[in-house]
Image: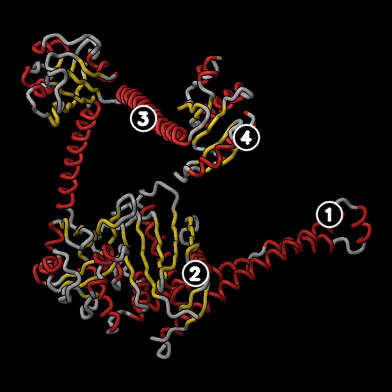
Amino acid sequence: MTNTKILIVGDAAYLEQPLRRLGYAVCATVQSASRAIEEAAGTEPDLALVDLGPEGGADGLEAAERIGSEFGVPVVLLAAGEEEAGQGLFEGAWTASTFGCVPKPIEEKPLHRNIQAALALHRRETRHRETACELERRVTALQEQVALMKDVFDTMKEGVFANDETGRRLLVNAAALDVAGTEEPREIADWAEQYGIYLPDKETLVRVEQNPLVRCFHGETTEWAEFFVRNRQKPEGIHVGASARPLPTKVNGLAAGVVVFQDITESKAAQARLNESLNDLREQAEVMEAIFDSVRDGIIVSDVGGKFLYANPAAKEMLGDAYVARKDGLWSEKPTPYYYYSDRETPIRNEDLPLPRAVFQGMATDDLDIFVPGGRAGQGIFIQVNGRPLRDRSGRSRGGVITFHDVTRQVLADEALAQAFAYGRLEIVDTILHNIGNAINSVTVGIETVHRGIADHRLIRRLNALAEAVGAHRDDWADYIENDPQGQQVMPFITALAGEFVQEKRRLTATVDRVRERAQYIADIVRNQSPGGVGRLNLKDIDPRDTIARAIRLVKDSNRAPSTRVDIDCDKAPKEIRIDESRFEQMMVNLIKNAMEAIEQLAASGGLEEEPRISVRACADGDFLDIEVSDNGIGTAERDTRMLFAAGYTTKGDGTGLGLHSAANFVISSGGQIRLLSDGIGKGATAHVRLRLPGQG
């Protein structure tokens, strides 16, 4: 009891000592109601003793009422018994917070009993109030939960029915009413007809025993069933999927169940569209597979582990045993030498092959030449391979693909041509004369231009005419110049004539410079082919665009197709390359001359229907310079264009076909490649040159 604090209100200070003897703590003793309220707020007593003596009865009642109502503190009244009761004061003092009354004079035991009783009653009432509040809160929460669940049910896209075995609806949400309507169900046997419930064929009404809700009444569960519903609410009909569960407890002694269904019309339509798309894709895949199976190039597709997912017949036939060796994706094993570089001697490491590069490193491979000794039925084969990684839309690896084709004939032709060059079996003298001839034509044209200008120069004739006119007036020169109309034209004539002499001098000087340049070009050819020059490269840094342009001028100066349009594109080529300038220029002259001759042939046959044009494009690729010379000339029907680079081969019938042969000599000697491609007669041609550049710097 030492924790019980008591507030004494009124003329009862004499109770402090008895209360402390009883084990209570007196927190304050006050006389007035206002002071009592202040002390109650500050000291928070557990009980208040309020004296209702004659001097402060009304004031005491006010204190008792306010202390009890405002602070929830139980009150025990102190009164004079029958005398005050007779005045009506004691009887009117009972309030909701009054839990006892001790008559005066005060005795300790009755006082103690009243205090204990008041505290016990107050605790019990407090618990009752808390219990009532808790019950009220729970009821409110359940009501809110029910309301929330109803709102949730009504906002669900799925329809929900709960019925007992008589068919009475226990619960239905808005989505269900939207399909079934508000009409209450009739007999269970009539449900299918009433609500228009059919099997997915849209024709057969559902039998009673097939109804998921009826099955619930027998304790059966339906995980998923599809139906078609067509009624007044859904005249077009919808497909629905339904699940049903029996309720675990009976409702009013009756079995009941709940059905949840959803409109799956759109999903079924989407599934139908998906199936149609899958069929289309399957057909496309079959067509693509048929195409891949019929192409001559090999195609291999692998997964992320390097295992072959697809290989067309051409791939299997070309690779032979080498295909079987890695089809299961065993790229990490020590490699058996199935694949070699084009030198036939250096094995290619597994990690450097195009397919594992694409799959495991995500790297592409372009035009890698590989020798497969066991390919093509064990005869050995050269293939050129391209590889690419396969990725999904998010960029993750899905594997890799390689394509390759048989280049055995091309490689063997290159080797034969290189061997012929190495053993000196090419007609060196004819080549020299051919290249000198190209330059001499230009020199001849230049000298002829100078000769014509000197032999029959119109400016000389005009100067002689001026001299004769002036000579006729040597005696009256001043008057002739000043007053004669013809004489007045002499000075303007002399000025104009001087300007024309200057222009003519420039033209002749430019012609002489070109003749000197061509003469130097001839000297370089002779020097490069002399005993001290054969096999030696006179390297220098040159601008490839300038050299190509100079080669074009040399060919055009020979009066060959002066109207042919020639475009140069060197934007992706280096500004300078280190190379033998003379031999590089000779190669370009021969390629451009060959293109112009092809245009002349097509024009002579009457087949040239567009502007004659040649395009020259150069670009860098590592240590190589790639050059393309394309024309819209006669083209070629040759399937193997390698023979076009043979010495003496020509389509012109004059037996002087050394231009492409000379160009091939220079390209092969640099370690490069040269090819001539054409789609056929009358469709033009393109010379592809891959020229290895010596070390720069």
x and y, in percent, of residue 248 in the image: 15, 28
Q: What is the three-letter code of the residue carrying label 3?
A: Thr
Real-space CA distance between mark 3 and mark 4, rounded to the nearest whole angstrom: 35 Å
Pointer 1 residue = 489
Pointer 4 residue = 30
- Closest to the camera, between mark 4 and mark 1, is 4
- Closest to the camera, between mark 4 and mark 2, is 4
Q: Quadrant of residue 232?
A: top left
* Contact, mark 1 vs mark 2 (Cβ under 8 Å): no
Provide the secondary structure element on which disc 4 rests. strand
Q: What is the three-letter code of the residue carrying label 1?
A: Gln
x and y, in percent, of residue 557 in the image: 51, 65
- Residue 407 in view here: yes
Which residue is depicted at the point 15% across and 67% down?
Answer: 326
Q: How crowded is mark 1: few (under 14 residues within 10 Å), some or many (20 or more)?
A: few
Q: How crowded is mark 4: few (under 14 residues within 10 Å), some or many (20 or more)?
A: some
- Closest to the camera, between mark 1 and mark 3, is 3
Q: Quadrant of residue 385?
A: bottom left
Q: Earlier in the sequence, mark 1 or mark 2?
A: 1
Q: How crowded is mark 3: few (under 14 residues within 10 Å), some or many (20 or more)?
A: few
Q: Earlier in the sequence, mark 1 or mark 3?
A: 3
| Circle number at residue 574 | 2
Which residue is depicted at the point 20% across and 57% down?
Answer: 301
Q: What is the three-letter code of the residue carrying label 2?
A: Pro
